[in-house]
Image: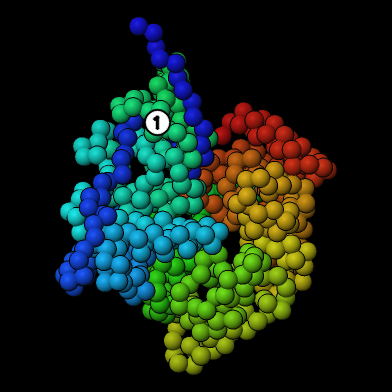
Amino acid sequence: MTQPRAVELRGLGAAPGSHLGPAVLVQKAGLASTGRRIRPEEAPAEVERLRAALARAEEELAALEAETRQRLGEEKAGILGAQRMMLQDPALVEAMVRRITEEHLGAEAACLKACEEQAAVLAALDDPYLAERAADVRDVGRRVVRCLTGAAESGLPKGLPPGAVLVAEDLLPSETASLDVQKVGAIVLERGGRTSHTVLIARALGIPVVVGAAGITGVVADGELLLVDGDQGTVVVAPEPERVAAYQAARVEAERERERLLALRDLPGTTRDGHRVQVAANIGEPGEVAGVLAAGAEGIGLFRTEFLFLHRETMPTEEEQFEAYRTVLEAVKPRPVIIRTLDIGGDKPLPYLEMPREENPFLGVRAIRLCFREPELFRRQLRALLRASPYGNLWIMFPMIACVEELRRAKAELAAVREELVAAGVPVADRIPVGIMVETPAAAVAADLLARECDFFSIGTNDLVQYTMAADRGNPALGQLADPFHPAVLRLIARTLEEGHRHGILVGMCGDMAGQPLAIPLLVGMGIDELSMPAPAVLRAKDLIRRADRATFAALWERVRGLATAQEVRACLEEALAELMKSEP
């Protein structure tokens, strides 16, 4: 019998990793009796059925939220918390009730219709964040209907085989949060995007994901072997024996390499001639600290505080914030923790703030600009930070600074809050370094002026690239322009480093570029003092830094700085990286 020919499908890599395992087709859970109509006199009883189902759905989500918080931390639990809050939204509940009392729909149809109408409004706003809220509204609606009908909790089959590859049109965030990582090895979806809540949860669980694999459910049979690559976005159906053998050999080699890198966990990021480059990690919530320390990070180079403000109906209290900051500072001390003040804008509106819709929220009232417009929010965060400062090595960073005036204003607010706390007898650390994100071309060009007035720079390459190149980093059509290796971007990075060092301050980097193997030798050669990256990239970064002396890295920058295109830069760096990997680690 001949081996069936392998079929390769291409989608988008959404969560990293690769996996070989049996396909399990996931059907949408059936929602019976959803088109039923009622007589007018049945409406009161139907409304009661609806309210009972809403209460049960809220209980289920509260339990799932608590479980997710324990497994994945506060940020991912917040996705389920936001769904739970939707069930308490008077406008949404009233819309359901009105369809029962006025249109005489059954509770199931009333719920689905009200949720679909609200989801359609959100999705039509052409805003990625609000589009995800639309998916959550639909998820909530289906959960309430399941509670009404007694249908299965989800469409996920029971008794999954070990290493299953879930294949579906889409998965709900709540379904993804309940997955057993011992049994699910990968996920392949026809729909969805890289930033969907389903993908965010799967990524936190360590499950590789490919989205946008059009037609996959019509090509794959239950139990068929799939080779999934969440980095490249490919799915191979019924791979040939040679390809399976190559994958398995690569897995063995990857495990051998992982063990080699683990030996570097407690070693510093030091070049062969003793030049130190601090290798730190980025986190988005306190629950990620254990993984960061286990990865060998030498500190926290970016603690994003947005998790405290998102997925909730009210502003976080000072006490909530204080506890989060203190927890991280205590866990990481004496290593430094750079905490960034709120960095959010109209792309992620907060329900407790008045945030008018903007044509271009990335060039609007966001980050430090929003904090200036909302002084109570800003001062509350600064108070919590200063109160937490005695518990560790706190550094405070202001985002989206474009000019000296903004830096001075932010520092003045910080000084005023410190003065109030000290006057009230509240302990505050004597020395707290204050710095800025260099993520606008204006800040990079004015680096000499800004360096005189702060203690450190951290280059945020994600935004620096899109602002410099006038190219939306989320637009795939502009991928070639939105390149951190473009000479224009490299010149701004070089200027930031030169002016920072000329004024005696530390210059680090916390954007995606900081953890890219192709970029690390170049950045060391440019003189970077600190690199902050996702925890899984830390050991590889240390390995690269330790493979050569500073002069070798500096010579690489000298070769690169005269090149004219991003393609030329990449080619030069790929050649240098290949040569570097030949040297003894």
Q: Is residue 223 above or below residue 570?
A: above
Q: Quadrant of residue 139?
A: bottom left
Q: For this view, does 283 lie left or right of residue 562?
A: left
- As drawn, 306 above or below 218: below
**Which residue is at 53% across, 49% downward?**
268
Q: Rate crowding at label 1 as few (under 14), some (14 to 19) or many (20 or more) other CA atoms within 10 Å.
A: few
The N terminus, quarter of image: top left
Tell how many labels. 1
Quarter of the image where the C terminus is located = top right
Confirm whether residue 278 shows in the render. Answer: no
| Residue 404 seen in the current view | yes
The x and y percentages for residue 446 are 77, 67
Q: Position of residue 559 (x, y in %)?
A: 79, 40
At a point 30% along the width and 67% down the height, the residue shown is 103
- The secondary element bearing badge 1 is classed as helix
Q: Is residue 64 left or right of residue 1?
A: left
Q: Amino acid at mark 1?
A: Gly
Of residue 49 and residue 279, the one placed in the foreground of this image is 49
Q: Tell whether 55 sits left or right of 201.
A: left
Judging by the rendered image, the residue that carries numbered circle 1 is 218
